[in-house]
């Protein structure tokens, strides 16, 4: 199934944010948050200070719960997030991006925009019964999340590092 660009972008950003909490923590400085902001083409307010960094870091556990829950729990978490932030979906376009959905104003704090955009993306996964697109890394030593947008649903590892580590281990086991 193909999802809208904003759905995929929000899910990719959310998975990267959640996975930044895995060792080694990759979101500890405001410069790293600024890179995340630019990489995932967020628009609107970006304070870039330690308080905003702390608030974004605090999102990682709740987003992980939302992204790894069963369908009914994910639905409840999505609804709570949207209600908490008084989300009102609207079509907008800016820059080089054609019409897509924003549900909070661009003046809303970055952590609010991340939470609401993730919840909006989860709506598409829940409605299409595609939560299986999200999973935990198949590497037994990793708790990273995997977003599988491939046609054949073959993605099992959160990164090439985990995939390579398991391929090498399997190779060595076969050679024994």
Image (tube, rainbow, N blue to C red):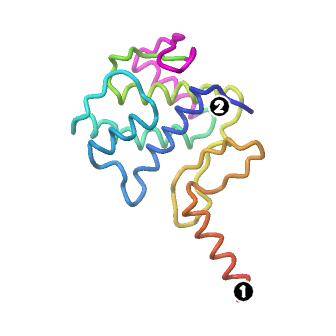
Helix, strand or loop under label 1: helix
Work out which quarter of the rendered image holds the C terminus and state it.
Answer: bottom right
Residue matched to label 1: 175
Give the vertical position of 149 relative to 155 (above or below): above
Residue occupying the far right of the picture: 152
Point out the tag, 1 or 2, that comes first from the N-terminus: 2
Q: Quadrant of residue 163?
A: bottom right
Looking at the figure, which quarter contains the N terminus? top right
**Residue 105, placed above or below residue 158:** above
Q: Is residue 84 magenta?
A: yes
Residues tagged 1 and 2 counted as in contact (Cβ below 8 A): no
Left/right placement of residue 44 relative to residue 18 reads left
Give above or below for 170 relative to 68.
below
Return the residue nearer the eye: 60 or 77.
60
- Please provide the residue range marked out in magenta: 73-100
Residue nearest the observer in this picture, 58 or 26: 26
Q: Residue at x 42, y 16 (%)?
A: 104
Disc 1: CA contacts within 10 A as few (<14), some (14-19) or many (>=20): few
């Amino acid at each position: 199934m193909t999802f809208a660009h904003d759905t995929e972008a929000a899910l990719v950003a959310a998975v990267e944010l959640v996975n930044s909490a895995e060792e080694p923590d990759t979101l500890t400085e405001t410069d790293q948050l600024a890179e995340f902001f630019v990489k995932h083409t967020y628009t609107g307010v970006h304070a870039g200070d330690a308080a905003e960094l702390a608030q974004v870091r605090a999102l990682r556990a709740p987003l992980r719960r939302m992204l790894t829950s069963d369908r009914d729990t994910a639905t409840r978490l999505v609804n709570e997030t949207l209600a908490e932030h008084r989300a009102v979906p609207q079509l907008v376009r800016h820059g080089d991006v054609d019409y897509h959905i924003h549900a909070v104003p661009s003046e809303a704090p970055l952590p609010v925009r991340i939470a609401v955009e993730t919840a909006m993306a989860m709506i598409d996964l829940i409605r299409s019964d595609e939560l299986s697109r999200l999973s935990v890394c198949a590497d037994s030593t990793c708790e990273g999340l995997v977003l599988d947008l491939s046609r054949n649903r073959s993605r099992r590892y959160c990164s090439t590092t985990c995939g390579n580590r398991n391929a090498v281990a399997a190779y060595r086991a076969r050679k024994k």
